[in-house]
Amino acid sequence: MQRREFIRSSCNFCLLTASGFLLTELAACSPAYQLIKTEVVNDEIQIPVEGFSQSALQLVRPKGWLYDIAVQKNADNTYEALLLQCTHQNNQLSPNGHGYTCSLHGSQFDKDGKVIKGPAENPLKKYTTNIDKDKLVIHLKA
Ligand code: FES
């Protein structure tokens, strides 16, 4: 192999390795939840249960609402539905992989909605849920 061929093949190897690394990094950056846009009917929201087979966390965005609802499937097959409204000054919260973070003043909440870092002092609003056939029902008035 001549010097020029060696350099060319080495560069190709480096490019392939770098592109594989970037693809892996991009896959790791993809969100660990699905966003479901839906409507409220009779003070309830229904979402398909099958979505939880792909991700244990679903964000529900009711039409006309200012805040999303995070629905987490727990290891014991129960569900936790939390309103992602910061209890400090009402900012929308974002999932952070182990709970929820407020970008305004830095409050953090765990997956159960309990405050783990202030300035927020109160837990997140929870909704009761139940399974009805292939739907998860979130009860907004209960
Ligand atoms: S509004 Fe969320 S910490 Fe202030």
Image (cartoon, helix red, strand yellow):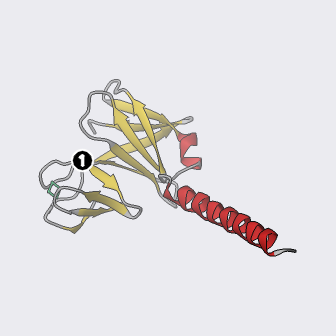
Find residue 93 and report its horizontal and vertical position in percent: 27, 51
Q: Nearer the viewer, residue 94 or 26?
A: 26
The quarter of the image holding the C terminus is top left
The quarter of the image holding the N terminus is bottom right
Residue 112 can be seen in this image? no
Q: Nearer the viewer, residue 104 or 18?
A: 18
Looking at the rendering, the quadrant in which ligand 1 lies is: bottom left
- Residue holding disc 1: 92
Say whether residue 64 is left or right of residue 1.
Answer: left
Question: Does the residue tagged 1 have its C-beta within 8 Å of any atom of ligand 1?
Answer: no
Find residue 113 and report its horizontal and vertical position in percent: 29, 58
Say whether residue 88 is left or right of residue 78.
Answer: left
Q: Nearer the viewer, residue 87 or 142?
A: 87
Q: How many marks?
A: 1
Find residue 42 and report its horizontal and vertical position in percent: 32, 24
Q: Residue at x 29, y 36 (%)?
A: 140
**Vertical comparison of 43 with 79: above or below:** above
Q: Residue at x 30, y 29 (%)?
A: 43
Residue 105 can be seen in this image? yes
Find residue 124 and report its horizontal and vertical position in percent: 24, 54
The residue sitting at the top extreme is 41
**Disc 1 residue type?**
Gln
**Vertical comparison of 33 with 118: above or below:** above
Q: Residue at x 58, y 41 (%)?
A: 50
Say whether residue 121 is left or right of residue 100.
Answer: left
Quarter residue 123 falls in: bottom left
Q: Secondary structure at mark 1?
A: loop
Q: Residue at x 19, y 48 (%)?
A: 91
Q: Residues within 10 Å of mark 1 (few under 14, many from 20)?
A: some
Q: Nearer the viewer, residue 38 or 95?
A: 95
